[in-house]
Image (spheres, coloured by chain):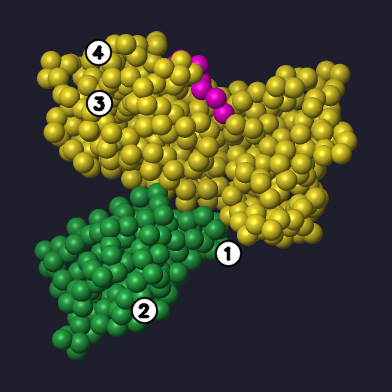
Amino acid sequence: MKITILYGTETGNAEMLAEDIQAELEGENEVDCLNLSDMSPSDFDASRFFLLVCSTYGDGDLPASAQPFAEAMNAEKPDLSAIHFAIFGLGDSEYDETFNHGPKKLAELMLAHGARQIGERVAHDASGDDMAEDLAFPWAEEVIAQAGEALGEAA
Amino acid sequence: MSGKIAIVGAGPSGCFLAQALLKAAPGLEVDLIDRLPVPYGLVRYGVAADHQGTKAVSRQFARVFERQGAQFFGNVTLGADVTLETLRAAYDAVVLAAGLSQDRPLAIPGGDLPGVHGAGTLTRALYDHPDACALPDLGPRPLIVGNGNVAIDLLRLLAKTPEEMTGSDLGAGPGEWLAGSGIEEITITGRSPAAQAKFDTVMIKELAKLAGVSIRVIGAGASDDPVEQKKIEAVQALDGIATGPRRITFRFGLTPLAVEGETSAEAVRFATDQDEEVLSCSSVLTAIGFGPAGDLPRDVLLADARDAEAGALAPGLYATGWFRRGPRGTIPENRADAQALAARILDDLKSDPDKPGRAILADLAEAVDYTGWTRIDAHETEAAPEGRCRAKIATRAEMLRRARQEERPK
């Protein structure tokens, strides 16, 4: 499968996880890994499956590198109805009121422009005991299996 | 691209810089030099013991050494073990990323009375820094001067019950000190109104979870600005929280004029917008900013800088992070700063193959390398007691002993 991993990061933790997922998926898939700050809404390609990896920053905000993307989406209002994505969130339950609000906002932004979400949004907790990749690798495998069917139907 | 770069300070700014340099140019020789035998600086000794999620950035930093090939030279003090001039002669570029670790003094009458403690001094002791002083007796009613994130960290730690430190890396000694502090009331005072307080809203919201406190917020004021309103609302929302006996009072618009007391701090006299007000206390904790440690002439270096804004001090000499910008901004801001400086350094870099680089550090017998740190790290993680994620080694001697301990042949 052709996959693009898009990450929104502030401290670099989401970037590191995105690169780890890329390394894990390469071989069986053709995988690009891109910072959301370098992604234009017009670059979405229906033949690819988009894996979003996004943290939360400040008071439940999108991380810095996702903010220009969000602004571009709101300005360009692309039709993403042919686009399939899945999303993995990074957060810290120490700040429980806004836990994983960044990825929640990013998913809502994709859905608002018609994109189709595959699987549930999974959230890693930096204050928990799990390593992010221990949750993210099985998640990626699962959503790729589901996306195989969805992208096949769309084609 | 080849080239030899020494970074002084293995805290977040130095590690993010090494990461960015080696990502762009994997062929560089990048060395991180730190006066402590252990890396990660502020992440280990400044980020609060109960903020382990924030400390997760150290996983990125470990990779800078393990995968990107940076080398660690710990327990190497600039000036004592190697001079800045020697480093500059040996490397193509030297970067000062030493941070700002010393408390800015409270420069008012009585500001040096016994019972006045800097937040950095106190948190170093709380977090088992090897150079820390003993933890002082704060008495039943400490008063905090300052309301930035450091002040909020201090407030939260002093307010927490022992149970609320579960999962942290707080040491046994500091844990006992906190549990037996006898603190009845903490007053936190800011010079600015709540609208312009320096704390981040998210740090204030976290206080709503405290399990043993009764919080009062006095004079939070009002604002028309939406960002300021969020700040006011967050702090106002704490008012009336009553989960336990330890009283916390937020005050704003108080400019300290003098610390009063015969032999130690007993009260602080403040200027208010109308008059003066005296708040009694049993100790004064200052969280009003940080300055350099004194082993580098920061003021001179910055004053003479050819492009201070870009972190270019002199040919082949740079600065980044708090050392360059001053004590403002969080870890991600220092990441952005380091990434910008990496681009500048790579742009400027002229590699001289005759420069010896790290060979000049080879004779430092007491230096700790990354392998030494992994031994310390493994020991600290394995020794963690129930309810803790780590048991920090608190002395240099013990760190060095663990670092040198060869693995037994199998």
Q: Which residue is mark 4?
A: B89
* Label 4 and label 1 in one chain: no
Q: Of the numbered discs in the image, which one, if any, rests on residue A97?
A: 1
Q: Position of residue A30 (x, y in %)?
A: 13, 66
Residue under the image location 77 percent in, 53 percent down:
B221
Q: Which residue is mark 3?
A: B5
Which type of secondary structure does the marked residue at label 2 adopt? Answer: loop
- Please identify the quarter of the rendering in which residue B35 is found: top left
On whether residue B197 falls in the magenta region, the answer is no
Tag 4: residue type? Ala
The hue of chain B in the figure is yellow
Which type of secondary structure does the marked residue at label 1 adopt? Answer: helix
Circle 4 Cα neighbour tier, 10 Å, few/some/many (<14 / 14–19 / ≥20): some
Which type of secondary structure does the marked residue at label 3 adopt? Answer: strand
Q: Single out the mark in the foreground, 4 or 1.
A: 4
Mark 3 and mark 1: Cα distance apart in space: 43 Å
Q: Which chain does the green colour mark?
A: A
- Tell me, yes or no, if residue B37 can be seen here: no
Mark 4 and mark 2: Cα distance apart in space: 57 Å
